Image (tube, rainbow, N blue to C red):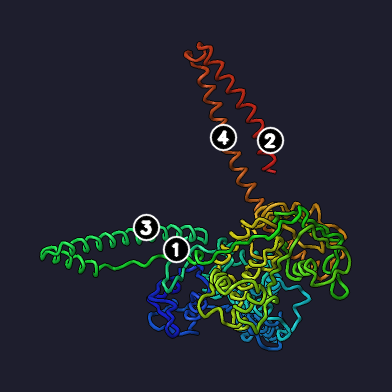
């Protein structure tokens, strides 16, 4: 055990965040902390790091173990470049390398005992340098930077010039390179594109230490974790398995709790009816019995009715009018900022009822496509044609459709003046805004709350073509699941940009990947995309698009492709070995059966039984044919 949290509690004023919570993390274990927004996940990580004090309880890190922490928001200071900032993590190795160079210079001028002493010191230092993987130090830094989505020409950028998301990626890179015994990560995928998330998954799965993750990316959690720590209304519960296992066990647990509550409520009602009946007899014995039952009833530990957050939030998207079958046609679309175009010659159509996801690396122009379709940006070239009776509903990841100085109530009332006060409150309540929350100003809301408010406006618009830009950003897992359900039941058309692979997998009927300045079409969800990506990229990515890419971008792409190719090669080799083993087993079994038949054919009771003899000869012929096929398969696999 590397980390133990025992009976910890934490409150802010009258709000109890965690009450008497306990869990532990084993060495090399990968665990997730889950819960709705505001449950206390980030607070728990800060408590483990000592940044927030516990009200009670104890948090113990195993003796001699190191711990590293990545917060959601980073403010990396200094005038270092990105590369220098990560290389600084390896300063002990760099110092050791400098010591080796110094010893080498001294050894050239020394002799006798001095030379022997220097050689001994050099041997020790060299051994330590090798043990710390010093020879691969700089390539390791480069690999982490590329894995996290930095191109080589960005390595020399000053930290002070970076955006908040880039600074978070730099901090993540520094943390991964420092290799602590246990890593705490708070929403590590927020500023990563799909390629970088995939790289981080592989890194963490193979990480020799322990990892504790707070994340809303269910695909990410399913791939990495083997334990889930849930915070729900202050209670801490531990589940074994990945996120899907947790979700299934949680549903079963809630069902059992609901049955127990219903049974208890039934028993309480029964006892109350008996007590009332006994009192109605108005006899001394009956009244005493009633009082006795009342005392017993008062001692019952009444169960709370189990609640489920998503039962409180219901989204129903209903188009006012039905669009024509042809919803959108894009022809020869081109857009760029500066000399280089983001994309060109884009051609695609969207039909009524489709749910189309646009995916691709950061900076390829996914959001730009949505803005072009919505008329927020003019195209450089090409045409965008909306079909008959198409009404767009647009969800912007920056929530620019909201007015910061308005209250939540006014935001909806001003947009939909025909709605009465009760209807507006009901809609806001459906999105978890109740009581005085409706009179908060938009500027005082968190990112997740603004997202929910924008979705509320979108719901009321009754649009028949939804254009959504990162709709799951800042939403907790429960809210994501509700949105998935709403979109899957939506009777019209959806076009969205997202890097949430689980969300894409659950909702998309088609995927458009923006890569090499063009779009590749996949008729299926994210699992289908992964299955067909290599094949379709090779078949349909235009050579002109590849040649037009800048040398630095091409180099970055090649590096990632090399890494992907290496993983695929390893997978193919494992499959070959498995197939070879299965083939050898099948050959052995058939050869043994052939030998058994030969032995049977020598027995009088067999070769005198014509039907049995024909049956065995037929089986022997079948075995011969199957063996010939298997020998050929074996030969191919063995080569």
- Say which label, 3 or 2, has the lower sequence index: 3
- Image mark for residue 239: 1
Residue under numbered circle 2: 632
Residue under numbered circle 4: 588
Residue 424 place in picture, x, y as percent: 58, 72
- Say which label, 1 or 3, has the lower sequence index: 1
Q: Secondary structure at mark 3?
A: helix
Residue 11 place in picture, x, y as percent: 43, 82
- Say which label, 2 or 1, has the lower sequence index: 1
Q: Nearer the viewer, residue 239 or 170?
A: 239
- Say which label, 4 or 2, has the lower sequence index: 4
Q: Is residue 213 visible?
A: no
Q: Residues within 10 Å of mark 2 (few under 14, many from 20)?
A: few
**Spatial separation of the CA atoms under disc 2 and disc 1:** 48 Å
Q: Residues within 10 Å of mark 4 (few under 14, many from 20)?
A: few
**Spatial separation of the CA atoms under disc 1 and disc 4:** 44 Å
Query: Is residue 51 toward the left or the right of residue 416 in the image?
Result: left
Is 320 situated above or below 587? below
Q: Secondary structure at mark 1?
A: strand
- Say which label, 1 or 4, has the lower sequence index: 1
- Circles 3 and 2, Cβ within 8 Å, touching? The answer is no
Query: Is residue 424 toward the left or the right of residue 234 in the image?
Result: right
Location of residue 7 (image quadrant): bottom left
- Image mark for residue 259: 3
- Say which label, 3 or 4, has the lower sequence index: 3
Q: Nearer the viewer, mark 3 or mark 4?
A: 3
């Amino acid at each position: 055990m590397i980390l133990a949290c025992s009976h910890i509690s934490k409150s802010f004023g009258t709000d109890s965040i965690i009450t008497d919570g306990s869990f532990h993390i084993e060495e090399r274990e990968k665990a997730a902390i889950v819960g709705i927004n505001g449950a206390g996940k980030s607070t728990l990580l800060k408590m483990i790091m000592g940044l927030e004090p516990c009200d009670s309880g104890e948090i113990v890190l195993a003796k001699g173990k190191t711990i590293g922490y990545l917060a959601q928001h980073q403010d990396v200071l200094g005038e270092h470049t990105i590369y220098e900032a990560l290389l600084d993590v390896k300063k002990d190795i760099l110092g050791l390398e400098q010591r080796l160079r110094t010893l080498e210079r001294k050894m050239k001028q020394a002799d006798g005992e001095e030379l022997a002493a220097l050689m001994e010191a050099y041997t020790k230092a060299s051994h330590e340098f090798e043990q710390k993987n010093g020879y691969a130090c700089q390539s390791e830094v480069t690999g982490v930077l590329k894995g996290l989505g930095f191109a080589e020409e960005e390595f020399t950028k000053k930290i002070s010039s970076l955006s908040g998301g880039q600074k978070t990626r730099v901090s993540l890179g520094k943390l991964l390179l420092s290799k602590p015994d246990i890593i705490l990560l708070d929403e590590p995928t927020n500023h990563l594109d799909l390629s970088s998330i995939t790289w981080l998954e592989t890194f963490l799965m193979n990480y020799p230490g322990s990892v504790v993750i707070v994340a809303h990316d269910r695909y990410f959690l399913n791939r990495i974790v083997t334990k889930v720590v849930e915070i729900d209304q202050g209670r801490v519960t531990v589940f074994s398995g990945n996120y899907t296992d947790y979700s299934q066990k949680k549903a079963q647990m809630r069902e059992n709790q609901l049955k127990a509550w219903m049974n208890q409520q039934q028993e309480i009602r029964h006892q109350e009816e008996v007590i009332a009946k006994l009192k109605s007899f108005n006899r001394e014995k009956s009244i005493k019995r009633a009082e006795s039952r009342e005392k017993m009833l008062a001692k019952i530990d009444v169960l709370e009715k189990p609640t489920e957050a998503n039962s409180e939030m219901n989204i129903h998207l209903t188009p006012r009018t039905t669009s024509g079958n042809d919803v959108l046609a894009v022809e020869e679309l081109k857009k760029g900022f500066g000399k280089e175009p983001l994309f060109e010659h884009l051609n695609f159509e969207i039909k009524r009822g489709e749910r189309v996801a646009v995916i691709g690396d950061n900076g390829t122009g996914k959001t730009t496509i949505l803005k072009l379709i919505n008329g927020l940006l003019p195209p450089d070239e090409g045409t965008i044609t909306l079909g008959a009776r198409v009404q767009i509903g647009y969800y912007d990841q920056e929530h620019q459709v909201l007015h910061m100085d308005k209250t939540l109530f006014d935001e909806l009332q001003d947009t939909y003046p025909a709605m009465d006060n009760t209807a507006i409150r009901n809609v806001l309540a459906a999105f978890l805004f109740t009581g005085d929350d409706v009179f908060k100003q938009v500027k005082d809301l968190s990112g997740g709350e603004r997202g929910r408010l924008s979705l509320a406006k979108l719901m009321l618009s009754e649009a028949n073509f939804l254009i959504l830009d990162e709709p799951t950003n800042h939403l907790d897992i429960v809210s994501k699941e509700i949105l998935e359900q709403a979109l899957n039941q939506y009777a019209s058309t959806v076009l969205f940009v997202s890097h949430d692979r689980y969300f894409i997998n659950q909702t998309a009927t088609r995927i458009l990947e923006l890569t090499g300045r063009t779009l590749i079409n996949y008729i299926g969800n994210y699992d289908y995309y992964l299955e067909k990506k290599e094949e379709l990229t090779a078949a349909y990515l235009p050579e002109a698009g590849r040649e037009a890419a800048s040398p630095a971008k091409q180099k970055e792409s090649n590096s990632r492709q090399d890494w992907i190719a290496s993983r695929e090669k390893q997978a193919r080799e494992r499959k070959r070995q498995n197939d070879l083993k299965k083939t050898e087993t099948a050959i052995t079994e058939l050869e043994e059966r052939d030998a058994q038949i030969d032995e049977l054919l020598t027995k009088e009771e067999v070769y005198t039984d014509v039907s049995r003899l024909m049956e065995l000869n037929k089986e022997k012929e079948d075995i011969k044919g199957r063996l010939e096929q298997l020998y050929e398969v074996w030969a191919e696999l063995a080569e």
